[in-house]
Image: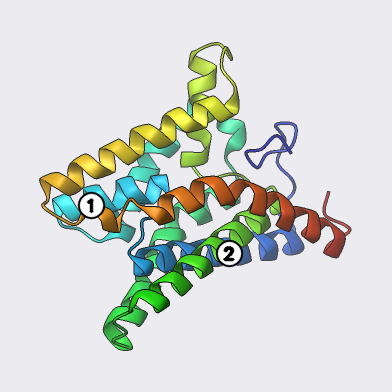
Amino acid sequence: MNGNGVKNGVLKKPDAGRMFIMITGIILIGMGVASYRISLFGVDAFTCMNLGISGFIGISFGNWQLIMNVFLLIAVFFTVRNCIGPGTVVNMVFVGYIADFCCWLIWDVLGINAGLSIRVLFLCVGTLFASLGCAWYMTADLGIAPYDSVALIIMKFVGNKISFRMARVASDVTVILAGVIFCILARNNVWEIIGVGTIVNAFCNGPLIQLFQTLMKRTFKNIN
């Protein structure tokens, strides 16, 4: 695994087992994004941008994330198309809507107005679900999300003169700034999209994904 969900640049055959692992991962990622949003402590970089822009133009998070993913998918197709697989499509379509559904369920149906302790709980759950979901999704090796390919596109355009990690940092900082700018323009609360949760996600997501992937390989011994 090269750190972005594609082994040696070749995707695996989408058999039933890998499809189950991939879909489970997508559901967990969507629930993780929703938990970050409900915590009001900040979200991951890509969600930060999409929440900022969707709030500015007045459409749902799920709808805007799908639109943004379509644009990114076009760029991926013409640059690093080997990253595209069934997992790419499922991720780009469903993560945003799963997150919207979970937020609707908590806020509108159950009417939960989270206090500080509950918000901290949602922050922890969001970190756990997002990392576990990414581990499942990446282990399936059926393609990666369009945004996760952006760092590879950057590397290609600079002739691989920077590392994947540096390219990812550059893309994350850029989208966070975009999210904050649009959030300010919409006069929404910036600290609901960037904050402690953003920092926790940045520092904990990678190590936890690696841990969960190791555990998964022990559980699903036929996945390699």
Q: Is residue 79 visible?
A: no
* Foreground residue among 72 and 128: 128
Answer yes or no: is residue 50 visible.
yes
**Left or right of 28 on screen, residue 67:** left
Give the mark count: 2
Type of the residue with mark 1: Val
Q: What residue is shown at x 57% (from left), y 30% (from top)?
A: 165
Color encoding of the figure: rainbow
Residue 162 screen position, x and y as percent: 56, 17
Residue at (84, 65) in percent of width and height: 219
Where disc 1 sits, the SS reads helix
Residue 212 falls left or right of residue 83:
right
The one nearer the camera, 190 or 147, is: 190
Of the image marks 2 and 1, the number of the one nearer the N terminus: 2
How crowded is the residue under tag 1: few (<14 C-alpha within 10 Å), some, or many (20+)?
some
Q: Nearer the viewer, residue 73 or 172?
A: 172
**Residues at circles 2 and 1 in contact by the CB criterion of under 8 Å:** no
Q: Please provide percent x and percent y for residue 32.
A: 49, 64
- Residue positioned most to the front: 117
Residue wearing tag 1? 190
Judged from the image, the secondary structure of the residue bearing numbered disc 2 is helix
Q: Which mark is residue 128?
A: 2
Q: Measuring 36% from the left and 60% from the top, which residue is drawn there?
A: 41
Viewer-proximal residue, 64 or 112?
A: 112
Vertical placement of 83 versus 99: above or below?
above
Q: Could you tell me which residue is drawn at 69 percent across and 62 percent down?
A: 21
Question: For this view, does 71 lie left or right of residue 27?
Answer: left
* CA neighbours of label 2 inside 10 A, class few (<14), some (14 to 19), many (20+): many
Q: Identify whether 40 is placed above or below 176.
A: below
Quote the CA–CA distance across marks 2 and 1: 24 Å
